[in-house]
Amino acid sequence: MIVITGAAGFIASFLAEQFNKDNENDLILVDDFTKENKKVNHLDLNCHKKIDRSEFIEWFNSNGHIVDYVIHLGARTDTTEMDYRIHESLNVKYSKEIWSICSSQKIPLIYASSAATYGMGEHGYKDDHDIVSKLSPLNPYGDSKNNFDKWVLNQKNTPPFWAGLKFFNVYGPNEGHKGRMASVILHTFNQIEKTGGMKLFRSHHKDYKDGEQLRDFIYVKDVVSIIEFMYKGSITSGLYNVGTGEARTFYDLAKLTFQALNQEPDIAFIDTPKDIRNKYQYFTEADMTKLKEQGYNSPFHTLEEGVEDYVKNYLST
């Protein structure tokens, strides 16, 4: 049995769907399955059992012997939520309980960390364990992810294999419920449908022109490919970046969405909301050396390929 937490959410539901395509249906799916805007993500998934996240820890304590692997992707991911206690409950305390059971029952564990841990990139974007204690995330979400990473690196009792995945900017199918936190591609698609144009955040940094803020955007299909590589293979435990290694601009992202719809770009700029303006990463780019040294050599979708596939084969259907 494979446990997947966050299974009604973005990445985890797409992962479960891929497992189903590979004829892997012995899945224990964990989440709050009552939310209407997430039902489309999980209604058609084949699984052994669905468990509400509030009941999972008790179930896991009693049934760990039937679990072969845990992929813990459930989290509070709202980077604009400033109450650390909300993030701590799901992203730290809940994760510690899962880690402890996996350690005691010798169950491999993959969990979701985040590139938000890198803050402004003062120490670069290398998934080196030595810099984790030095990192300064820009918001409580990033703090919670980094605090769990720090805790993990200090543990003597560990699962037989573990990997913390530092997701960069993931985009793709099954993100429709994410609202403000959804990708610029989805926001662009929706704005084009409503108004014919797109408004991007203006730059408030002297080194970056409007629309030229840079992020490492990775297609969810590539994220799932990396998780499957870890699940099926034998690599060294540790923290791993999950990006493409190539930063691209938000303007590129919006422009490519227009192109996938066979429309001329109509892009304007608005002020970045004040509540996130000082907590905004203007540049991220994953150093992917560690994962590649472990044998991962599948090519990533280019931004052009990923946006075209997402828009034409998912959003437009």
Image: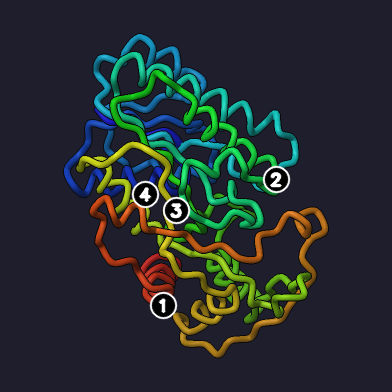
Write down the residue under mark 3.
174
Residue at 52%, 87% (x, y): give it: 263
Q: Amino acid at mark 3?
A: Asn
Residue at (50% x, 44% y) in the render: 38
Q: Residues within 10 Å of mark 4 (few under 14, many from 20)?
A: many
Q: Of marks 3 and 1, which one's residue comes earlier in the chain?
A: 3
Give the quarter of the image for residue 100: top left
Label annotation for residue 304: 1
Q: Is residue 18 left or right of residue 280?
A: left
Task: Name the colouring of the figure.
Answer: rainbow
Of marks 4 and 2, which one's residue comes earlier in the chain?
4
In three-dimensional space, the C-alpha distance between marks 3 and 2, rounded to whole angstroms, equals 25 Å
Helix, strand or loop under label 3? loop
For badge 1, the amino acid type reads Glu
Is label 3 in contact with label 1 (beta carbons under 8 Å)?
no
User: Which of the two discs, 1 and 2, labels the residue nearer the N terminus?
Assistant: 2
Label 3 or label 2, whichever comes before in sequence order: 2
Nearer to us of marks 1 and 2 is 2
Callout 3: 10 Å neighbours few (<14), some, many (20+)?
A: many
Q: Which quarter of the rendering shows the N terminus?
A: top left
Q: Specify few, some or many for label 2: CA neighbours under 10 Å numbering under 14, 14-19, or 20 or more.
A: many
- Nearer to us: label 4 or label 1: 1
* Alpha carbon separation for disc pair 1 and 2: 30 Å
Q: Earlier in the sequence, mark 4 or mark 1?
A: 4
Q: Which residue is mark 4?
A: 14
Residue 204 percent coordinates (x, y): 78, 70
Please give the residue where the numbered disc 2 appears in the rendered image: 139
Mark 2 falls on what kind of element? loop
The quarter of the picture where residue 205 lies is bottom right
